[in-house]
Image (cartoon, rainbow, N blue to C red):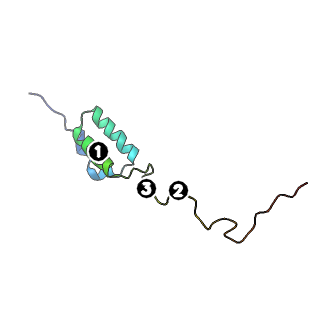
């Protein structure tokens, strides 16, 4: 008869994994793969698929273009020109 150690996956719930940052979840997934913990790998994959792919963990806002109506001209000011010496 072979005795089986209780799985490490008992300590990892979806809620607990969801509290981790995306890089931490990737590391947990990689470790779980190495240790053949398929249940943890599955949970990590599901959570990672649901996360935004912006690189910051936050949804993207804006177009990346500068705002219009900002700066000196919009404020009714003129830029000072250097005085020739």
Contact flag, marks 1 and 3 (Cβ < 8 Å): no
Towards the viewer: 42 or 70: 70
Give the Cα distance between marks 3 and 2: 15 Å
Residue 4 placement, left or right of 46: left
Q: Nearer the viewer, mark 2 or mark 1?
A: 2
Quadrant in which the N terminus appears: top left
Examine the image and state in which quarter residue 39 appears: top left
Q: Nearer the viewer, mark 3 or mark 2?
A: 2
Give the Cα distance between marks 1 and 3: 19 Å
Measured from the top left, where is residue 36 in percent x and y? 24, 33
User: Which residue lies under the disc numbered 2?
Assistant: 64
N-term-proximal mark, 3 vs 2: 3
- Residue positioned most to the bottom: 76
Measured from the top left, where is residue 57 in percent x and y? 42, 52
- Residue positioned most to the left: 1
N-term-proximal mark, 1 vs 3: 1
* Callout 1: SS: helix
- Label ID, residue 45: 1
Give the Cα distance between marks 2 and 1: 30 Å
Q: Residue at x 58, y 63 (%)?
A: 67
Measured from the top left, where is residue 31 in percent x and y? 32, 36
Residue 5 placement, left or right of 53: left
Contact flag, marks 2 and 1 (Cβ < 8 Å): no
* Callout 3: SS: loop
User: Which residue lies under the disc numbered 3?
Assistant: 58
* Callout 2: SS: loop
Measured from the top left, where is residue 24 in percent x and y? 38, 44
N-term-proximal mark, 2 vs 1: 1
- Residue positioned most to the right: 85
Instruction: Give the crowd class for mark 3: few <14, some 14-19, many >=20 residues within 10 Å.
Output: few
């Amino acid at each position: 008869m072979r005795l089986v150690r209780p799985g490490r996956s008992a300590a990892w719930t979806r809620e607990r994994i969801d509290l981790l940052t995306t890089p931490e979840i990737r590391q947990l997934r990689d470790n779980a793969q190495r240790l053949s913990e398929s249940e943890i790998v599955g949970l990590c994959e599901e959570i990672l698929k649901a996360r935004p792919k912006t690189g910051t963990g936050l949804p993207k806002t804006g177009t990346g273009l500068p705002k219009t109506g900002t700066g000196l001209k919009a404020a009714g000011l003129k830029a000072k020109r250097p005085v020739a010496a």
